[in-house]
Image (spheres, helix red, strand yellow):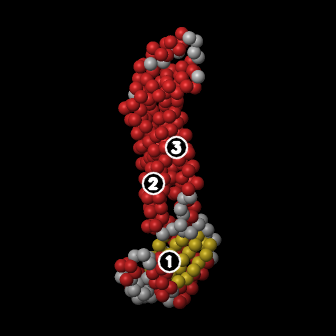
Amino acid sequence: MRAQFVLSEIWIGLRRNLTMTIAVITTVAISLALFGAGLLINQQVSEMRGYWGERVSLTVYLCNDTSPSAICQESGAASDEERQAIQSQLESMPEVAQVTFMTESEAWQDFQDRFSNSEALVEATEEGDIPANFRVQLQDPGDHDTVAGAVAEMPGVDSVSNDQEVLDQFFELLDGLKWAALVVAAVQLAAAALLIGNTIRLSAYSRRRETGIMRLVGASNFYIQLPFLLEGAIAGLIGGIFASGFIVATKFFLLDKVQDWFQFDVTLGMGSVFYVIGVSMILGVLLCTIASFLTLRRYLRV
C-alpha cells in the first residue's frame, strides 16, 4: 500500500512538472554524454601512450646524393666509415635498446608499406628519395634528446627525426579534446543540479497540502521526502540511459575512426565502454538525488 502511494506521488510530480522534468532529463543526458566522452577519450589516450611508449624511436637519416641540407651538400653522401662510426656510437649508449640499419631500398619499401593507403603519396616518392637510416629503439622515451644530441652533429648525419615529437602533438590534441568535453560536462552538470533543485522545489510547493496532511497523520520525514528523491533519481537514470547511446556512438564513430586514420591497433574494448556508461549513470542518479535532498531540506519543512 505504501509502495503504491509512493509511486502515485512520483507520477503526480512528474506529470505536474512535465516541462521542467524534460528539461532536466535533457540537460542531464547532454552533460553525462560529454562526461562519458571525456572518460572514453582519457582511457583511449592512456592506452595509446602505453602502446606507443614502448615503440617510440628515433630515426637517424644519413646523407645521400640528393640530401638538401648544407652539411650533406658540402660533405657528400655518408661513407661506410661514417656509417659504422654512427652505428658504434648508438650501440655504445646505455639509453639505446636496439639499432636497426635500413638501406635506401629498404627504407623506400618500408615507406610504401606504411603509407599503402595513400596512393598519391606513394606514387610521388621514388627510390632514393628516402635516405638510408638507423631506426633507434630507446630504453626510455624520455631519453630521445640525449641520443639525438649525441649523433646529430656527427659526419654523415643529415637529420634526426623524433617520433616522440609527433606523438606529443597528437596526444596534446586528444588531451585538449578530453578536457574540453570534461569542462563543458561540469558546466552542464551544474546546470542540471540547479534545474533538478528548481523542479523538486516546484513539485514540493504544488503538493504542500498533501505533505501537510501526511505530517498530521504521523508520516516520517523520510517517507514524505521519498517521492521527491525518487523523482530526481528517475530523471537522472533516464538522462543516463540517453547519454549511454551517445557514449557508444563516441566509441564507434570517433575513437574507432581515429584508429582507422592512423592505422594502429589500440582499440578500446566494450568493457571500457560499459564501465564508462555505468559510471555516468551512477553519477547522474547521485547528482539528481543529492540535488533533490538538498533542495528538500531548504524548501520542504518537515
Residue 168 makes an appearance in the image = no
Query: Residue at (54%, 77%) from the top-left corner?
Result: 135
Query: Residue at (48%, 18%) from the top-left corner?
Result: 300
On the image, numbered disc 1 is attached to which residue?
Answer: 60
Circles 2, 3 touching at the beta carbon (< 8 Å): no
Percent coordinates x, y for residue 43 in the rendering: 54, 54
On the image, numbered disc 3 is attached to which residue?
Answer: 280
Percent coordinates x, y for residue 15 in the rendering: 41, 28
Circles 1, 3 touching at the beta carbon (< 8 Å): no
For label 1, the SS is strand
Residue type at mark 3: give it: Ser
Q: Earlier in the sequence, mark 2 or mark 3?
A: 2
Label 2 vs label 3, nearer the camera? 2
Classed neighbour count for the residue bearing mark 3: other residues with Cα under 10 Å, few (<14), some (14–19), many (≥20): many
Percent coordinates x, y for residue 291 in the rendering: 49, 29
Where the N terminus falls, by quadrant?
top right
Q: Nearer the viewer, residue 286 or 43?
A: 286
Q: Is residue 233 left or right of residue 92?
A: left
Q: Earlier in the sequence, mark 1 or mark 3?
A: 1
On the image, numbered disc 2 is attached to which residue?
Answer: 249
Relative height, residue 132 to residue 171 (above, below): below
Residue type at mark 1: give it: Val
Label 2 vs label 1, nearer the camera? 2
Residue type at mark 2: give it: Ala
Query: Residue at (58%, 70%) from the top-left corner?
Result: 138
Task: Kindly report the distance in space between the C-alpha atoms of the residues bearing marks 2 and 1.
Answer: 41 Å
